[in-house]
Amino acid sequence: MNLEIIKAIKGLLDIPQKIVIIPHKNPDGDAIGSTLGLWHFLKGKDQDATIIVPNDFPKFLKWMPGSEEIVNFEKDPSVAKSLINNASVIFTLDFNHLGRIGQLQPLLESSSAAFVMIDHHQEPDDYAKIMYSDVGMSSTCEMVFNVIEGLGELESITPDLAISLYTGIMTDTGSFKYSSTTSRTHLVVAKLIEKGAKNTEAHNKVYDTNTPSRLHLLGCALKNMVILEEYHTAFITLSQDELDTYNYKKGDTEGFVNYGLTLEGIVFAVIFIENREEGIIKISFRSEGDFSVNEFARAHFNGGGHTNAAGGRSDVSIEETISLFKSLLPQYKDDLNA
Ligand SMILES: [Mn+2]
């Protein structure tokens, strides 16, 4: 990675700082893994560091070492506020514009701390003094590894640090199968296992924690799947009533969207999930090949992300959202047939 970035980070960490590390709202495995990985590293360097999440994260990530010390802004706003107000350095991980952190946005905007962005999403904003942004990376966790390596600190990787980064790489690459997985990713993962990451344990703890109600919700989602062969597209809907019926818990719908892509010939998969409390439809987009769901989400559903994985939202009803979605497909017919 870029030597200037390493030099700048080294310059910051050469003196004691008050550090806050922040991932995006609704943090996923890469968000929690990368912030914890960096946190373990900074603790090892005797830096004063705290992770603040904009809101809670799924239970299947709560076994990760150090996760119990994460400050949840929604639960402890005053603690979070004072940490941010006193911070001299703020690392923002796994996102690239401040609109991705919900209610934390104004606090960060008024902070005078030095910002460091480490992220692999497209079209980054320029709020950070130090910007390590690379859309070619499998995960933010892989980038945190690169930073530690760039600083010449590989020997300081403990098993707790290793398992944090391993878990985020694992979840962001769909267990090392997405096209963002490179030979370098595997080399990093090999190094992390060497450093004590218990890889099988990470897979079991993240993926083998289904509850009966989650599997029943999955059954409902799959039953609702609509296949539009003409557009090589499959979409799923879940209404708030359906979520309630199956006792929905945060994180339960994680990965559901991917089932559409397991159908032969399908290159575009979408899930629409109603959230009555927020009055929105949450949307996840996935694709195989060149069709950019990042561009699709940006153009039509107030979202974005990566070429093959993106998120978005809609403020109208689920029925209206679906008909809007269907009405958009004809203009993408050629792209979806490629
Ligand atoms: Mn990520």
Image (cartoon, rainbow, N blue to C red):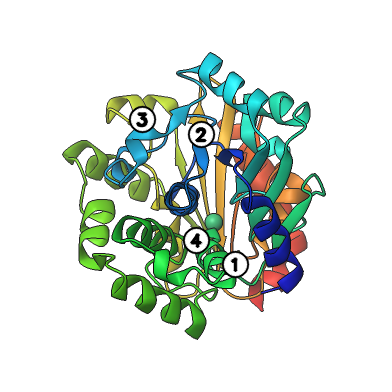
Q: Amino acid at mark 4?
A: Cys
Q: Which mark is residue 242?
A: 3
Give the number of the mark in front: 4 or 1. 4
Bin the neighbour count of mark 1 within 10 Å (Cα to Cα): few under 14, some 14-19, many 20 and up: few
Residue type of the residue flagged with mark 2? Val
State how far apart marks 3 and 1 are (Cα): 28 Å
Which residue does the numbered mark 1 point to in the structure image? 230
**CB at disc 4 and ligand 1 closer than 8 Å:** yes
Label 2 vs 3, first from the N-terminus: 2
Q: Can you identify the residue that label 4 sits on?
A: 141
Q: Distance from label 4 to label 1 (Cα)? A: 38 Å
Identify the secondary structure beneath mark 2. strand
Q: Position of residue 319 (x, y in %)?
A: 58, 33
Q: Of the residues under marks 2 and 1, which one precedes in the sequence?
A: 2
Q: Residue at x 71, y 65 (%)?
A: 7
Residue corresponding to mark 2: 53
Q: Nearer the viewer, mark 3 or mark 4?
A: 4
Ranked by sequence position, the earlier of labels 3 and 4 is 4
* 83 w.r.t. 168: above or below: above
